Image (cartoon, helix red, strand yellow):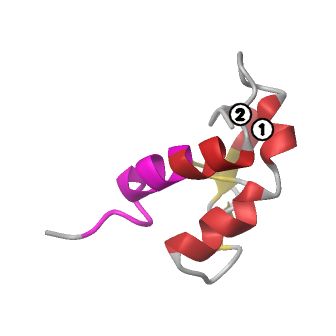
Amino acid sequence: MPLTDEFFGTNADNSKNEDYCKFCFANGNFVQDCTMDEMIEHCTQFVDEVNKYMPKPMTKDEYKQMMRQYFPTLKRWKKQD
C-alpha cells in the first residue's frame, strides 16, 4: 500500500502522521497491540486490496516476503541500537 495523504494515520490532535498508515495508527495510538510477525499474518489477508495498487499482482507468499523485508525498516519495528 502506498503511504499517501489518504492513507496517513492520525495523531492525538487529529493531525496527519506520516510515519504510519491509518490502518495501523489512529488518534495517536497503534490500532493493534501485536508483534511484527502477527502483523504480517494479519496484513496478508489484504493482499487482494494491495494488489489494486501494484503494477504486478503478488501472491500471499510474495507479499509476506516483502513485508518481512520492509517491516523491520519501519519506525515501529526497527530495532534500537
Disc 1: CA contacts within 10 A as few (<14), some (14-19) or many (>=20): some
Toward the viewer: 26 or 24?
A: 24
Q: Residue furthest top?
A: 55
Q: Is residue 66 left or right of residue 40?
A: left
Q: Is residue 68 left or right of residue 25?
A: left
- Height in image: 28 above or below 56? below
Question: Which three-letter amino acid code belongs to the residue tagged 2?
Answer: Met
The residue lying at 65 percent from left, 49 percent from top is 61
Toward the viewer: 17 or 55?
A: 55
Q: Residue furthest bottom?
A: 33
- Height in image: 81 above or below 53? below
- The range drawn in magenta is 66-79
Q: Is residue 10 visible?
A: yes
The image quarter in which residue 39 lies = bottom right
Q: Is residue 28 visible?
A: no
Which numbered marker is on residue 59?
none
Residue 70 drawn at (x, y percent): 45, 47
Residue at mark 1 to residue at mark 2: CA–CA distance: 9 Å
Q: Is residue 77 left or right of residue 43?
A: left
- Label 1–label 2 contact, CB within 8 A: yes
Residue that numbered label 2 is attached to: 58
Residue 34: within the magenta? no
Residue that numbered label 1 is attached to: 50
Kindly state the secondary structure of the residue where label 1 is placed: helix
